[in-house]
Image (spheres, rainbow, N blue to C red):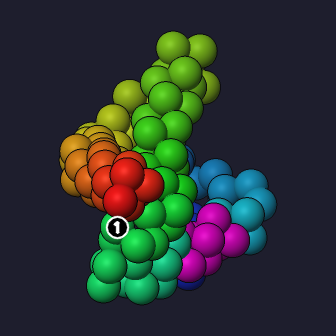
């Protein structure tokens, strides 16, 4: 729903004054579409994440740099700290499984090189 109606999504989260329209809602809809495409990649990679480690790496990088960008926004007072709650559920919890998959893929590639 957030991608289709970004004004309501941002107002509900407290990140937008409901009396002021969101600038460039198409930008947020495009970002939602990109996140949806990531989801398709994750579904395909889930069948064999070690083989599809580049998709896992792209996901890990997104989950890593997203929170860094949010923290920078909070420090520079361009973003409200309420976004950290979403980051925990949406990004930080994925660091461990993505890192474990990437470590396993690396070890498998090293093992194959030795054989």
Viewer-proximal residue among 34 and 75: 34
Q: Main secondary structure of the magenta part?
A: helix
Specify the quadrant of the image occupied by residue 115.
bottom left
Q: Residue at x 44, y 63 (%)?
A: 53
Q: Residue at x 44, y 39 (%)?
A: 64
Q: Residue at x 73, y 63 (%)?
A: 27
Note whether 76 is above or below 65 in the view shown.
above
Left/right placement of residue 103 relative to residue 25 reads left
Left/right placement of residue 41 relative to residue 102 reads right
Quick one: label 1, few (<14), some, or many (20+) residues within 10 Å?
many
Residues drawn in magenta: 29-37
Question: Does residue 30 belong to the magenta stretch?
Answer: yes
Q: Which residue is mark 1?
A: 50
Note whether 106 is above or below 72 in the view shown.
below
From the top left corner, tell me how far across and down residue 114 is, in percent. Answer: 37, 52
Specify the quadrant of the image occupied by residue 43.
bottom left
From the top left corner, tell me how far across and down residue 50 is, in percent. Answer: 34, 67
From the top left corner, tell me how far across and down residue 110 is, in percent. Answer: 38, 49
Determine whether the residue tagged by mark 1 lies in a helix, strand or loop: loop
From the top left corner, tell me how far across and down residue 61 is, in percent. Answer: 50, 46
């Amino acid at each position: 729903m957030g991608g289709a109606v970004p004004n309501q999504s941002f107002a509900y989260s407290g990140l937008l004054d409901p009396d002021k329209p969101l600038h460039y809602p198409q930008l947020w809809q495009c970002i939602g579409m990109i996140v949806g495409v990531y989801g398709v990649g994750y579904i395909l990679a889930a069948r064999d994440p070690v083989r599809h480690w580049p998709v896992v790496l792209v996901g890990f990088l997104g989950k890593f740099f997203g929170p860094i960008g949010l923290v920078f926004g909070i420090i520079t007072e361009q973003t409200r700290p309420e976004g950290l709650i979403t980051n925990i559920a949406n990004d930080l919890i994925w660091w461990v499984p993505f890192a474990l998959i990437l470590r396993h893929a690396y070890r498998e590639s090293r093992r194959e090189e030795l054989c």
